[in-house]
Amino acid sequence: MRFFDAPLAIVDLETTGANPAYDRVTEIAVIEAAGGEITSQWSTLVDPETTIPAAIQALTGITSQMVAGAPTFGALAQGLYERLAGRVLVAHNARFDYGFLRHEFERAGLRFSARTLCTVKLSRRLYPEHARHSLDAVMARHRLECSARHRALGDAEVVWQFLRVAGAERGEDALAYAATQIAKQPTLPAHIDRAAIDAIPDAPGVYLFYGEGGTPLYVGKSVTMRTRVLQHFAGDLRSPKEMQLAREVRSIEWQRTAGALGALLREAELVKQLLPVFNRRLRRAADPCSFSFAPPDALRLVSLDGLDAAGASHLHGMFRTRRAALDALRGLADEHGLCLQSLGFDKTRGAKGACFRHQIRRCAGLCAGAETPQAHHARLVAALAGIRTAAWPWRGPIGVIETEPESDATDVHVIDHWCYRGTANSEAEVGELLEGARLRFDIDQYKLLVRHLRKGGVQVRSLSSPLARE
């Protein structure tokens, strides 16, 4: 099917504000098109049953006096529902118009769902060489005329003109392909409200999936939360686990952060608090451990539970289980010819006191007197150097600063000796976090903080309070 053969509904709304949860519609316009031609135009003022803010009146020209006596959305709902049925809803910033329609129809007792095509996204895809894609920018770029800017029918007419011009300039095949890519939307389960998804910002943060009875199912993070959430419901899911998760979700919550680090830290924190069914990797380790080696002391396996955070810099390796630690040590021993028997991690003995590993040529032979303790010690030091825990390079706690470019919101992540104390939005909150209880060392926090702070361009400032202890 060619693009313009599809039944389209070009929609524009004027409203009392920008939040569909409590703002209301003041004007609706629908242009119906099929076969490349307009088949119907309809518009009406709507009584929002609330006052219209002065700033909105100045922008749209729609006053409270104008909508007095106009039909309410509830009175229009059934007719509008039938008018839109079976059509692709086209709008400039379609999420805005679609979100308002969903809420208004819901208030009227109707469940509304439609395929949508956003002409902001269409403009970006077809004209990537241009930086701006607002309706005013599109009008200026293509020399489009508007009979009444910021009025529903006038703006809807501009959107229709843009579709016609884009089809002529880029070709209808390119228009159809771009529209198909943009209009692809995951099919949401019946119990998930599309409006709830639309309310999630495409910004950094964490999202939480809950099942029946509020059971925590999954905690995820992303720098584009809405996009990532929608991916969970994509029709091409391959993993049985992902398909099961999508079937069991009953509600979704989200928390915004200023950047990627905040999302990572919050995700790790929430997984340990809530123990979601489908999260495994970030759960609190059952037996976290590391190797302690401070010559002349022997190599020892030590537990990380209850470890004072400042003591972590003298350790080698961070492991979630004792088994993982011993497997890593065997790997190092194989690579460097170390004697696990001499280190106290292998009790098997072969002929003349030599360990079994020496007989299969994995041990260089300290146990058999084939090398000196000094030579073995030098190789052990070299082997452990590759897994040594990073030393804390600051004298005390630091604040890692993240700023979200779109909103200028700033978070300060308070970190002390690789331990995350919390995120603050003010100096007072920073002080409260620094006065908190003793730090508990956490493997996941350590790993993600080391990785993040080794990047270039990270904003860090020193904080004055010393490391808190019991």
Image (cartoon, grey):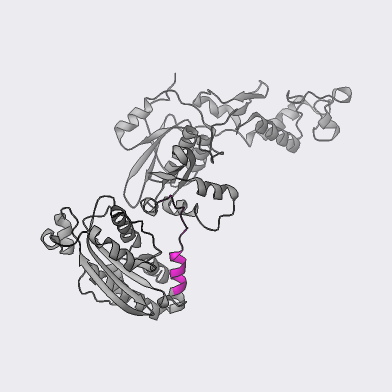
For the point 50% across and 26% down, which residue is it?
309
Q: Nearer the viewer, residue 110 or 134?
A: 110
Q: In this picture, which residue range is highlighted in magenta?
A: 176-192
Residue 12 vs residue 303: left or right? left
Q: Quadrant of residue 130?
A: bottom left
Give the percent coordinates (x, y) of residue 20: 28, 53
- Kindly identify the residue that appears in the image at 80 percent across and 35 percent down: 362
Q: Position of residue 135 (x, y in %)?
A: 29, 68
Eyeballing the image, is 316 above or below 207? above
Q: Quadrant of the C terminus?
A: top left
Q: Check the image and report above or below for 190 versus 297.
A: below
Tell me where residue 439 appears, x and y as whole percent.
46, 26
**Residue sitting at x 61%, y 28%:** 290
Q: Residue furthest top?
A: 470
For residue 139, say whether it is visible: no
Residue 27 is inside the magenta segment: no
Q: Position of residue 377 (x, y in %)?
A: 71, 28
Query: Given the current orientation, which residue lies at the most extreme left position?
Result: 65
Left or right: residue 253 versus residue 96 is: right
Residue 190 lies within the magenta run:
yes
Q: How many marks can you see?
A: 0
Q: Nearer the viewer, residue 337 or 183?
A: 183
Where 173 sits versus 235, above or below? Answer: below
Is residue 102 visible from the viewing direction of this image? yes
Q: As drawn, which residue projects farthest toward the right?
A: 351
Residue 90, image quadrant: bottom left
Give whichever of 160, 349 is nearer the camera. Answer: 160
